Amino acid sequence: MTRSHGAPHWRDKALFTPGPLTTSRTVKQAMLRDLGSRDAEFISVVADVRRRLLNIAGADPEAYTAIPMQGSGTFGLEAVLSSAVPRDGKVLVLVNGAYGRRLAEMATVLGIGVSTLEWPENRPAEPAEVQKALAGDSSISHVILVHCETTSGLMNPVEEVGRIVADAGRTYFVDAMSSFGAVPLSMPESRIDYLVSSANKCIEGVPGFSFAIARLEPLLACEGVARSLSLDLLAQHRGLESNGQFRFTPPTHSILAFHQALLELEAEGGVEGRMRRYQANHRLLLEGMRAMGFREYVDVDHQGWIITTFHYPDDPSFDFDRFYDHLSSGGHVIYPGKVGTADCFRIGSIGRLDAADMRGLLSAIDDALKAMGVSLAPAKGTLKAGLD
Ligand SMILES: *Cc1c(COP(=O)(O)O)cnc(C)c1O
């Protein structure tokens, strides 16, 4: 597929990144409106967005609430952390990548007591170690897990950890930023009290806001806890419940785009349908990269279909900056990123991308290797059973 750049074309470079992502033309077109933030039409769009989010999370509106929050995903995480953990609370953050580390840092900045359990960036969190940590420290009130660690693409055992956290009577907070909408997840079954994701990941909207889905019982007990006025999750919930409105200027255009993105998610067959497209993208990518001799960083058993990390080829002629520029100038934006001590780069399978995009990328990668004079021996390996 040829793409032209510079002028405002509907189709820009394809984004093989963790977000913002390539979005559909119709999602972008949904923003060509100027709606008043207090107008009935906008209020009804917000209500429908909230209802659809609960539905995706398998969450009963009697027991859960969906709370959009201005700002990127990190703002949503900070809203939950700063609003849900009481002064005498303490969080246990399960860390195996940059996003887990950021959550621990966020707690420190907020003056919240924090301890961490850490694993290498290509190893999932160990539920048994979480159980031991909770048994050994009764002051831990909240456990925080990153569902898909976007640093590497690794999936953490969200349901197993949830059972342990619930059995220990603690509150469970999941960063599902890069998985929500593309990996089936039921909040009640995974015993999740708070979940956060954002507009510009697997729902395929544009940046501008994040959202928390909260179980009402713990949320309503958070009176007086908030450490921030604008990020006060309970106040945001109360505002939306009382008059359907945001407390402060909402990202109206971004919400309109997101509403359209939710309709397109439904048309694609919901989370299952989207998952199938992303899995097919991931599988094409993995097969093609292996055939060229690349090795992936995360073991197949722990690898999700959201984003895949590859080692630099073991060839001195490989120069990442040249590789990146070659791909970008051909219309393919990949994502740099060192993982642990390994030199790696990442390729996302998410956003409005399909098999033709993946094949286009693979052939551009082949060209880039040839241009640099890199030669690799094809790698061996088996694909994840579920993808065959
Ligand atoms: C994208 C992402 C975030 C939030 O990033 P923002 O840049 O603030 O939107 C947080 N956690 C994970 C796992 C992510 O993938």
Image (cartoon, rainbow, N blue to C red):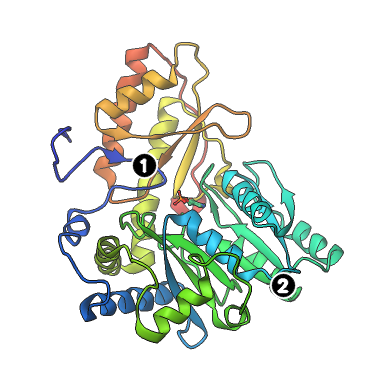
Earlier-in-chain disc, 2 versus 1: 2
Q: Secondary structure at mark 1?
A: helix
- Distance from Cα at disc 2 to Cα at disc 1: 41 Å
Q: Residue at x 53, y 76 (%)?
A: 234
Q: Position of residue 374 (x, y in %)?
A: 41, 14
Task: Classify mark 2 as within 8 Å of ligand 1 or not, answering yes or no.
Answer: no
Q: Position of residue 210 (x, y in %)?
A: 42, 61
**Label 1: how many Cα within 10 Å (few below 14, some 14–19, many 20+):** some
- Residue 175 visible within the image: no
Residue picked out by circle 2: 170
Residue picked out by circle 1: 284
**Label 2: how many Cα within 10 Å (few below 14, some 14–19, many 20+):** some
Q: Residue at x 47, y 84 (%)?
A: 60
Report which quarter residue 365 is drawn in.
top left
Identify which residue, 304 or 207, lies in the foreground: 207
Q: Secondary structure at mark 2?
A: loop
In the displayed structure, 204 sits above or below 236; it is: above
Q: Residue at x 53, y 43 (%)?
A: 151
Please tell me whether mark 2 or mark 1 is closer to you in this view.
Answer: 2
Identify which residue, 281 or 168, lies in the foreground: 168
Q: Which mark is residue 108?
A: none
Residue type highlighted by circle 2: Arg
